[in-house]
Image: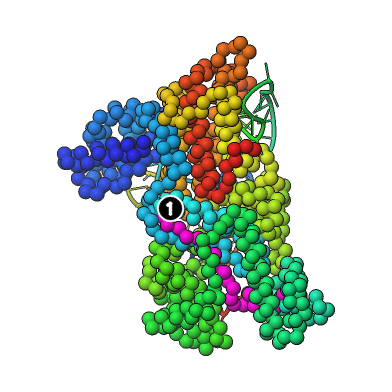
Amino acid sequence: MTEKVVGALEGALQKARRKGQLKTKAFPLVTLDLPKRPEWGDLSSTIAMTLASLEQRSPHDVAQIILDNMDQPEVIFDRVEIAPPGFLNMTVKRELWLKVLNEIEKQGHAYGRTDLGKGRRVLVEYVSANPTGPLHIGHGRGAAVGQAIANLLKATGHDVVSEYYINDSGRQIKLLGASVHARYQELHGRVVPFPEDGYQGSYIETVAAHVRDRVGSTLLDLPVEQSQQRCQELAQHELLDMIRQDLQSFGIEFDSWFSEASLLSSGSVEQVLEELGKRDLLFEQDGALWFRASAFGDEKDRVVRKREGEYTYLASDIAYHRDKLLRGYDLLIDVWGADHHGYIPRMQAAVQAYGHPKDRLKVVLVQMVNLMRGGRKIEMSKRAGEFTSLREVIDEVGTDAAKFFFLMRRSDTPLDFDLELAKQQSAENPVYYVQYAHARAASLFRVAESRGIPVPQPSETELGHLRDPDELGLIRTLSRYPSVVEASAAALEPHRLTFYLQELAALLHTFYYKHRIMPLISQGESNDAEGFVKVGGAPPVRSREEITPGLTAARLALMREVQQVIRNGLDLLGISAPDRM
RNA sequence: GCGCCCGUAGCUCAGUUGGAUAGAGCCCCAGCCUUCUAAGCUGGUUGUCGCAGGUUCGACUCCUGCCGGGCGCACCA
């Protein structure tokens, strides 16, 4: 439908150019807006205004030229008007709007999907939490955002792989080993000092107990180095399993798991340093080896090998991103905690060091989650090892509610997450609000079935019965869905889709309440149904609407496609669309 | 001090990448169940878009400078 309108405008532009009325060679892209006021029609274009400066004519003149050069506008439009300074306001014929429903029917699950990405290969890396403890709520937000972005990119024709980077090397993981080792010894009655900055959480004791169950006291006689190493391996394995399980419960699956340690054992890191060295991007200073990040816009150079000879995290991270690039991805997306934002320039420097434009790596930042309960903030202290785990949140509010809340705001702004609200089963809870819209439609179909009323597809019924503004409003909103998906994907901002779904759900609920879809089961009464329509502060005024079989069929077909779009949207967000609640 | 992000209704936040008279939810108030799920609906109040300039047909949106808040500035990850 929008294609037809855009086509009409573009056709007019071409024709005007052939006639010499317009001079611009490459016309800007014709885009359509949805006017806010009914007087502006139901689609508008600013093309005349953008073209005005190029043509050096007034916006109004350009608009007039476009208008005059349209071929048979009456086929598509009821009205086209020019509004100052040069808006083209169009009222599209109702029959064309109705065809949107046929389009959704035809595409079904694929409605909203496009091939704009042209199969570009994208790697989305997210969560990537250290296997040193259970996932906390912040990781949950990152997981929801990462998954939604991956889904959105898939839906827009990208070839997407999702990956989890396991930091199974370096200081933190050693500290894990040392912490578990200390607790392990305590379990055997030894009094040992707990490592400074060690992991305090009580789960460490649990893990230590599992180590003991598994190996008994055999580690006690080994050299400290060795027994710590063993503790680390066992603990890391167990914690990674736990993370996998938590993610599974959260409905998240990764295509690929990538180990940092493998980069070191395979010699990748050394190779990277060699390559960078050859390009004169490394230098030694104060006994350490530095990467010339400042040559690519970072504010300073960065150490890749410490004075003691150990590689820094950055070294393996460069190797990791090099590996991703070598695997042939056109675009790398990293989802990071916002506290790592200072790290972006040096990572993009690494990408550039390998000869790629810096925006081949895009970093999506995820801000922290403030957990609330009934409006009061729950204090968390990671230092003391007390933080709310994702598991607890899933158990309390469910995965759908958690995901929806995580996706309600732009990811780079802090999020207040109220557990009480997320559990609440009412209109105040946006998750239920949207899901209920889907369930409500399903319920309608069940009732129809029980009454022997068919629920037709749009193609199987006369849609011409749909003439109420509420029906057309619903259809117009449905027609927007593909562009919402496209914009969300392009901006890597899933929350836009979340907002759209709330809007669409609201329209469905309103429609449901204002209008009857099936006739009342009347005791000898007519098909006239009562709906509440006009109000003005006073109690609702009842008005009558004749519910004919044709109208019922058309409305059921409409509901079918509204439900389809809600389902498609929730699906992209990784949230279920229940038929019954 | 330098860098990044943010500042929109009492609160929490959107704002279609520069469009027309800036929106939604919550809160508060008043209503709506003999209705296809009230897990719902209807109506009502709210704005110097942090401040000051600039760019242009047009700025919440872009640029500059301030003010205020958050985060980062490791041979940690």
Q: Nearer the viewer, residue A293 or A363?
A: A363
Which quarter of the figure is the C terminus of chain A placed in? top right
Q: For this rendering, which residue is in front, A76 or A204?
A: A204
Kind of element beneath mark 1:
helix
Which x, y percent locates residue A270? 47, 82
Mark yes or no: residue A487 visible: no
Q: What's drawn in magenta, residue-wise?
A: A158-180
Q: Residue A228: x, y in percent?
A: 69, 80
- Residue located at (42% from left, 24% from top): A462
Disc 1 marks a residue whose amino acid type is: Ala
Q: Residue at x 53, y 46 (%)?
A: A571
Q: Tell me residue A245's x, y (percent).
A: 64, 60
The reply, left or right, for residue A483 in relation to residue A528 is left
**Which chain letter goes with mark 1?**
A
Q: Is residue A375 left or right of residue A83?
A: right
Question: Among all residues in the image, which is located at the extreme left?
Answer: A19
In the image, is residue A380 above or below residue A208? above
- Look at the image and say whether residue A43 sits in the magenta stretch: no
The answer to whether A337 is drawn above or below residue A417 in the figure is below
Crowding at dot 1, Cα within 10 Å, few <14 / some 14-19 / many 20+, comes out as some
Rendered residue at 44%/79% (across/down)? A272
Hey, which quadrant is residue A306 in on the image? bottom right
Residue farthest to the right?
A189
Which of the image's four quarters has the N terminus of chain A? top left
Q: Quadrant of residue A452?
A: top right
| Res A421 quadrant in image | top right
Q: Residue at point 41% right, 55% down?
A: A158
Q: Which residue, given by chain and number where applicable, does mark 1 sit on?
A: A490
Horizontal and vertical percent position of residue A290: 48, 82
